[in-house]
Amino acid sequence: MSDLLERLRGRGWRMTAQRRVVAEVLAGEHVHFTADEVLARAAALLPEISRATVYNTLGELVSLGEVIEVGTDGRARRYDPNAHHPHQHLVCSECGAIRDVHPDVDPLAGLPPSERFGFTVSEVEMTYRGLCPDCVGG
């Protein structure tokens, strides 16, 4: 069973067949599907699932804090189930591929107190950009 499914069951989230399929589609490492990609994969497993059900389920998962919505430069929003493990993203500027990365440095350490303007910083979002191996080779 995936980490996401385990977390949802632990919360007592009502697990309908449709919700289970959406959660199964989001299982795995480096998963960053668009809503349409989730729909296509879910429909392959459960043909009767509707677009509205997939979109509503994704919205619920985001509201619950179990999935993170990731936006990159005007591209379609993507859904990341790695919501409980701090990480950053590496994004291909050409094809939009996304990988989770876990830098060894504290991203907040790069922002000196003089540049915080009195803010109490609660989180940092950093995105590393470059070209993936497929785009470099193509």
Image: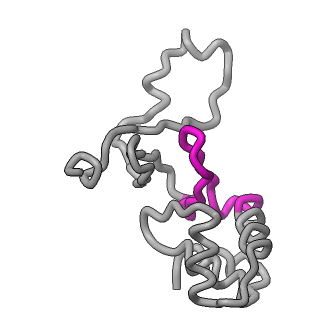
Of residue 1 and residue 77, the one placed in the foreground of this image is 77
Residue 21 located within the stretch drawn in magenta: no
Could you say which quadrant of the image residue 118 lies in? top right
Image: 45 above or below 91: below
The stretch in magenta equals: 62-84
Residue sitting nearer the eye, 84 or 70? 70
Q: Is residue 100 left or right of residue 75?
A: left
Look at the picture and state if 26 lies above or below 63.
below
**Residue 74 magenta-highlighted:** yes
Q: Is residue 17 above or below residue 107?
A: below
Q: Residue at horizontal 52%, vertical 75%?
A: 27
> Could you tell whether 49 is left or right of 29 in the image?
right
106 horizontally vs 69: left or right: left
Name the quadrant containing residue 80.
bottom right
Residue 12 coordinates in the image, percent (x, y): 76, 80
- At a point 24% along the width and 52% down the height, the residue shown is 133
Q: Is residue 6 visible?
A: no
Q: Position of residue 14 (x, y in %)?
A: 79, 83
Residue at 34%, 42% (x, y): give it.
104
Q: Residue furthest left?
A: 137
Residue 90, x across and y down, in percent: 40, 46
User: Residue at the spot x=59%, y=76% of the render?
Assistant: 40
